[in-house]
Image (cartoon, coloured by chain):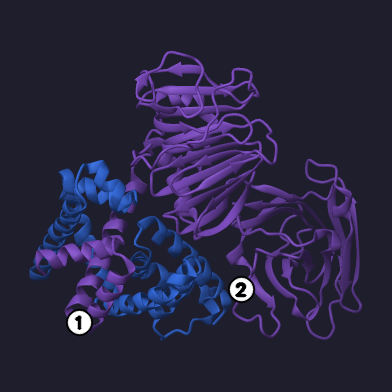
Chain colours: A blue, B purple
Amino acid sequence: VPESDQRDRVLRLAVEHRAAMWAFAKGLAKNPHLAEDVLQDTFVVICEKCAQYHHGTNFLAWARTIIRYRFLAAVDPARHRLVSVESEVLEQALAATESDGDALAERRDAWKDCLDRVRGRARKVLELRYRDGLGIAHLAERLRLSRNALYTLLSRARRALRDCAGRRTRMRGVR
Amino acid sequence: MNAAGALELERYLAGDMPDAELEAFLARAKRDPHALRSIGEALLEESLVHECLQAEASVRPAPEPCREGARRRRPETLAARQVHRRRGRPVGARRSLALLPLAAAALLAVWLIGPGDPAVPPADKNDPAQLYVAEHTGPGFTVNGTAHDAEALRPGDRLDAPRGCGLTLRSRDGTTFTIEGPTRLALGRAGPGTQLRLERGALAAQVAPMPKDAPLVFRTSQAEVTVVGTHLDVATNGDTTWVRVEAGQVRVAHPRAAAVVLRAGQRAAVIDGVRTTVAATRPRLELDFEHPPHRSWCQDRTPGSTLSYDFVEGRESPAALRVRYRVAPIGRGKQWVWVASNEWFGTRDWSAYGGIAFWVKGTGNGARVGLDLGFGKNAGLVRYSFSFADESSEWRRIEARWCDFGAKLVPGGAEGRGLDVGRIDCVAFVIGGGSGTMLFDDLELVP
């Protein structure tokens, strides 16, 4: 395979699996900003090492390995063991939810539709946490909530989105 | 999942668990497929929300970066910040950079992070570093909780500028701080070794040259920024501290990672006390061929080829590198000529940049031309190359991102490490066929 074709193919896979890669990076980093940072570093490494990827093998597993190393390079060495344990758990957790590209695209569309309908404090908390990347302490102060109340709000906002997206996907299936 | 389980999951997702509890949580999750699935689903849902919100933000018109008053005071800084909004290229730290205008514009509130420097000497009106309020616009500000009407600020004062309030603080040595509310600033000791604690908000600073042993120090909850004499912006939202250096040098440190020195045109983000990312904010001219050291190059060619180089008038500049060549059409293997930077080049760290650009003028004969970057020495030399065709006899600018460079010479032991732009030891121009003349000018590093 010519080098440029190989790079194009690998980058297409990276773009296709971006959501799953971000999820893994966020699982390790906890902070959306840091997750985005790690992910962008990972894209650079993928670009540089695209020749090492063998088509037909598990792209996500390869990409997660790069993410793990990029993240490990940034954390205190004393936490490396715990991060390694956590990355194993995250790999298993995300592998349990993997779906093909079409299913993910359909799900993404449903979430987007539903997110447009979220209003009020639920919308605010999602924007501040996932778009602006605010930390929990700052977010709690900004919304004048205790941490537990904030966690409940975040959990409910996502559950409402999940329910809404589930209904939409089922309706599309019926049509 | 019950309420307690949902709460625990949220705490895990937020990183709000001590290590011992985290270890126990992970051990439990490993044994429970239902828990594993919940974690996976939650992370994927977070990812979808993040993606949808980012997509929304990217199609909306850019928000006004600041109020009218603020734009009057710092038009170039805010405009520059707008320019650095995310462009979608896969280069590390760009996300952090894209958030800089957000932090500066939104000026988010954070918890008060502790007392200022307790050991402060009394105010001294003759002290050249003594700060005073030079300009004030908008609502009134408070010092130590009371409305302030005096000009001079005393060491130990805690200044609170509400939303809409603009302040310019100046000292007699020329140091200037521009503040936009809401900002809270604690003034430490004045004079040599001045310390300021930025508790929330943002400020822009132009700092007069200071003694090396008594620099100006900014502190935030994540970072300590040491200034010797420079022009910089610092902003914090409580989780992340952003520093951008316009001129001079500053040192950025936090307790859990190595300190970094930022030079003019660089910026750093200290994120959650975990790491510091550094990136360039503007191009840097690296080789102009006009300074004597840039005029000594080494050359090589395959047998039968000819090559010479000299310096002639360049593109809007007195000097450009001219290479006259004839590559032998037949020989063993590939035929080429090259000129490479000499000992003067040293080892250069280009890791804060995303690529390299240069100007070229050829003969339009379609010859393959390459820019090689090398690192390592002798048998360990690694070379990566970016190539293009000589398709024009006019000056044109070529730009290559680091990921456009492909491996050309990778000795055993260096496989898979990729192009290390943190230690570039030489650059070379390689021409792979035909005959003609090529001019090269103004190599610059691009963000």
What residue does disc 2 label? B418
Amino acid type of the residue that numbered disc 2 sits on in the rendered structure: Gly
Tell me the crowding category of disc 1: few under 14, some 14 to 19, or many 20 or more residues within 10 angstroms, Cα based. some
Q: Mark 1 and 2 residues: CB-CB less than 8 Å, in contact?
A: no
* Residue B298 locus on image (x, y percent): 88, 65
Q: For this view, does A78 lie left or right of residue B226? A: left
The secondary structure type at the circle numbered 1 is helix
The secondary structure type at the circle numbered 2 is loop
- Looking at the image, can residue A34 be seen? yes
The disc, 1 or 2, on the residue closer to the chain's N-terminal end is 1
User: Of discs 1 and 2, which sits in the foreground?
Assistant: 1
Tell me the crowding category of disc 2: few under 14, some 14 to 19, or many 20 or more residues within 10 angstroms, Cα based. some
- Looking at the image, can residue B342 be seen? no
Q: Tell me what residue is drawn at x 35 percent, y 70 percent.
A: A24
* Residue A66 locus on image (x, y percent): 47, 74
Amino acid type of the residue that numbered disc 1 sits on in the rendered structure: Pro
Above or below, comparing residue A54 to residue B137 in the picture:
below
Q: Quadrant of residue B42?
A: bottom left
* Residue B447 locus on image (x, y percent): 59, 51
Q: Quadrant of residue B141?
A: top left
Give B286 or B239, whichever is nearer the viewer.
B239
Q: Which mark is residue B33?
A: 1
Cα separation, mark 1 vs mark 2, equals 38 Å
Q: Quadrant of the C terminus of chain A?
A: bottom left
* Residue B87 locus on image (x, y percent): 47, 51
Give B151 or B293, whichever is nearer the viewer.
B151
Q: Are marks 1 and 2 on the same chain?
A: yes
Q: Tell me what residue is drawn at x 61 percent, y 73 percent.
A: B418
Q: For this view, does B360 lie left or right of residue B239? A: right
